[in-house]
Amino acid sequence: MKKIVLILTCFFIFSIIPAFSQENIQDILSKSNFIETEKSEITSFFASIEKDGIPSRFLLPRLEEGMAKKMPFQKIMTVLENEATALKRAQVVLLEAVPSFSFMQEEAVWMHTALLFNKKVPESGIRMVVGASATRWKDFRLATELYFSLVQWG
C-alpha cells in the first residue's frame, strides 16, 4: 500500500512540474507583444529544453529581460538558444567528469560551468578545473577564477 501511495505521489508531483513551468511561460508571454507564431516558438523552445533536463526557470529570467528591454523576437531567441547550448555543454562536461553529478543539488556549479562556456573559455580549461573540483564543488567558483586569472596573466 505504501509503495502505491509513493508511486502515485511521485507521478502527481512530476506531472505537475512541467505544467507549472508552462503556466509560467504562458503568463510571461501574455504580457508580451509577440505574435502567436512567436509565442508558439518560445513555448516549443521551453518544452524542448525541459525534455533535455534543463529547468525552464534557468532561462525564464532571460526571456523576461529581453522583453523588458524590448528586444526583437529573433534576438531573444538567439540569446535563449545560446544559453541552452551552454547549459547542455556544461551537462556533458560535468557528467563526463563525475558520472554521478547531481544537477539539482549543484545547480550553481552547473550554471557557472555554462557561464564559462558563454564567456568563450576554452573547453580544455573548463574540463581541467571541473576535474580538479569534482570532490570539492564549494571551491569550484574560486578555482575557476584563479585558474583563468593565471592563464590571463601568463
Image (tube, rainbow, N blue to C red):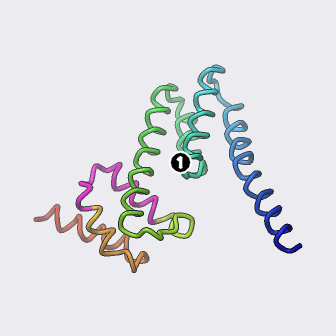
Q: Which residue is drawn at 26% across and 71% down?
A: 146
Q: Mark 1 points at which residue?
A: 52
Q: Which of 86 and 32 is in front in this view?
A: 86
Q: Nearer the viewer, residue 98 or 151?
A: 98
Amino acid marked by disc 1: Asp
Across and down, in percent, residue 105 comes to 55, 70
Mark count: 1
The image quadrant of residue 75 is top left
Across and down, in percent, residue 21 comes to 69, 46
Element assignment for label 1: loop
Task: Check the image and report above or below for 44 versus 116.
Answer: above
* Mark 1 neighbour density, 10 Å: few (under 14) some (14–19) many (20 or more): few
The image quadrant of residue 34 is top right
Main structural element of the magenta stretch: helix, strand or loop? helix
The image quadrant of residue 42 is top right
Q: What stretch is highlighted in magenta?
A: 109-125
Task: Name the side, left or right, on which 149 lies relative to 85.
Answer: left
